[in-house]
Image: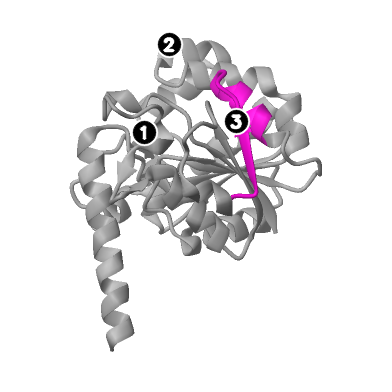
Amino acid sequence: MVDAVVLAGGDGAVIDPACRFKGLLPIAGRPMVEWVADALLAAETIREVAVVVPSAENLGKWVDDVGKIVVSDGSFVDNVVAGLGAFRGERPVLLVTGDIPAITPEAIDDFVRSSLATGADVTYPLVRKEDVLTQFPGSKRTYIRLIDGPVTGGNMMLVNPVLLLANREIGGRIFATRKSPVAMAHIIGIRFVVKLVFGRLTVSEVEQKLGKLIGGTGAAVYTAYASVGADVDKREDVVVAEKALYERTRDRAVSKVE
C-alpha cells in the first residue's frame, strides 16, 4: 500500500467567482476535492490520505473522513513538500490533484499497482486520446503526439518521496516552464522538445529523460481509465464531469435494482 497527497488549492474563481479555492468548486452537489478524497479512501492500494489546502476554514464535513489536513498556500512545489511532510516514512506516495472529480477507486488501484510493478522512482500516467473521447465525450484536452499515437497526461504521479525531496528545485523549474517550449528547452534540452513538438518521441525516450533529470528511474504507465486525466480547469469541464458522475450514479442505482 502507499500513501496519498491531494493538492486541492488553485484559483477556483476562474470557474466560479464565489469559489475560495479550486478544491471547493461545487461538482454535482459536492466540493470537487471530496469526490477525489472519497475515491482514494475507497481504493485498496491507499493507506492514508493527506489533503493540502490553502486554508482550513469552512471546508465542510468531508474533512472528518480524511486522515490529515495540511495547510499550505505556497508554490506548487512548496505544497507538494508540505503534503509529503505529513508522512514520515519512505513508502511511495501518490500525488493527486484535487480537480479530477470523476476519478474512481478502480482507476487509482490500477495505476498504483502498475506503477509499483515497474519498480521506478517516479511514474506518470498516459491516457490514449481515443479512451478520453470515448469515456468523456465533449472533453477538450491537450494531447502530446508520441510515435505510438496521441496521449494526454494524467493528474497523478507515484513518487519515491526521498528522491523527490532531493530534486525539489528541478521539479519546480519543470513545472514553472511546462507551458513554454522555449523555456523548457533550456532545462530538458532542445532536441527532446523538438521531437516532442513533432510527435517523434517514444515512451522509452520520455522515461529515460525523466530518469536522468531526477537522478533515478522514471516510467510512463499507460492506463485505460481516462478519469485520471479528466481535470476541471474551465466551465465546460464542469459540464463534462457532472455528466459522467450523474451517469455513474444512475448506472449503480440500476444495478442495485436488478
Q: Nearer the viewer, residue 39 or 194?
A: 39
Stretch in magenta: 66-83
Q: Are marks 1 and 2 in contact (CB under 8 Å)?
A: no
| Quadrant in which residue 248 is drawn | bottom left
Q: CA distance from mark 3 to mark 1?
A: 16 Å
Quadrant into which the N terminus falls: bottom right
Q: Position of residue 50 (x, y in %)?
A: 62, 43
Asked whether 43 falls inside the magenta stretch, the response is no
Q: Along the polypeptide, which appears first: circle 3 or circle 2?
A: 2
Asked whether 69 falls inside the magenta stretch, the response is yes
* 89 left or right, relative to 237: right
Q: Along the polypeptide, which appears first: circle 1 or circle 2?
A: 2
Picture residue at 53% right of the left edge, 10% below the top: 186
Q: Along the polypeptide, which appears first: circle 3 or circle 1?
A: 1
Badge 2 crowding class, 10 Å Cα cut-off, few under 14, some 14 to 19, many 20 or more, is: some
Q: Secondary structure at mark 1?
A: loop
Q: Are marks 3 and 1 in contact (CB under 8 Å)?
A: no
Q: Which residue, given by chain and number where applicable, does mark 3 sit on?
A: 209
Q: Which residue, given by chain and number where applicable, does mark 1 sit on?
A: 199
* 222 left or right, relative to 159: left
| Residue at the bottom extreme of this rendering | 258
Q: Amino acid at mark 1?
A: Gly
Total labels drawn: 3
Q: Amino acid at mark 2?
A: Val
Frontmost of labels 1 and 2 is 2
Picture residue at 29% right of the left edge, 27% below the top: 18
Judge whether residue 211 can be spotted in this image. yes
Q: CA distance from mark 3 to mark 2?
A: 17 Å
Identify the disc placed on residue 182: 2
